[in-house]
Image: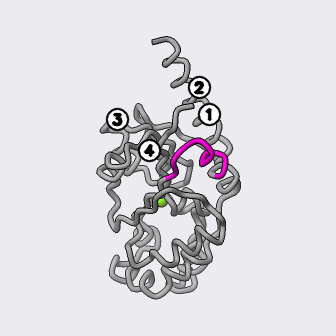
Amino acid sequence: MNQLNICIDIDGTMTEAYDWIPMANDYFNTQITPEQVRVYEIYDILGVQIESYNEFYSLYGELMHDEVRIRIGVKDVIDKLHENHRIHIVSAREEKMKNVTEKWLSRHEIPRDTLSLLGIHNKVSKAQELCCDIFIEDRYENAVELASVGFKVLLIDCNYNQGHCYSGITRVANWLEIENHIKEYVQICQYSQIAT
Ligand SMILES: [Mg+2]
């Protein structure tokens, strides 16, 4: 069995992608719906300055990260993957969110080998450092950056990541599809080893 290094993003990938909306609507007095979330930058969707959004995030970010729901299938699939592969959680969250992040991961009993909070969106150098085989992501720009240097990316389908899937990027609807794609990938690796 090939042991893979599987890198997994948190927000929108392990968590429900639109759970921030009610809190943001309350704070900004807006009526945003998930269908309107067509870009990744939340301040753009809300029609507010980035500074206002940052103020909202500094007040409520930790609470949102604590309360956000886990996507269906995440724990089951990661449990199974962790039996044979390494699980690296790689998030753009800032280091100051480490406590709430670890608490949330522990509450949901998510097994992991490493946790990296980068504080920036670009994940290429961390993927290189971790010898990433597959990266599971929801941010389109991240997927493109990763795929452009040769990483295989599974992009979980959201309203805000509808760009063209370049070579190396596979769009998946849910965690069951993620599990199936990784199983297929492992089989292909095994066949190619037998063939050589
Ligand atoms: Mg994300």
Q: Which amino acid is tagged 3?
A: Gly
- Colouring method of the image: one colour
Q: Quadrant of the N terminus?
A: top right
The tag earlier along the polypeptide, 4 or 1, is 4
The amino acid on which the numbered mark 2 sits, given as a three-letter code, is: Gln
**What numbered label is drawn on residue 183?**
1
- For residue 163, which numbered disc appears in the image? 4
Label 1: element kind: helix
**Residue 12 in the image, given as x and y percentages of width and height:** 54, 60
Provide the residue span drawn in magenta. 79-87
Q: Residues within 10 Å of mark 3 (few under 14, many from 20)?
A: some
Q: Residues within 10 Å of mark 1 (few under 14, many from 20)?
A: few
In the image, residue 184 above or below residue 57:
above
* Distance from Cα at disc 4 to Cα at disc 1: 26 Å
Mark 3 vs mark 2, CA separation in Å:
20 Å
Q: Point out which mark residue 150 bears.
A: 3
Instruction: Tell me which numbered mark, 3 or 4, is placed earlier along the sequence.
Output: 3
Residue at left offset 53%, top offset 79%: 24
Which residue is painted at 66% across and 46% down in the image? 80
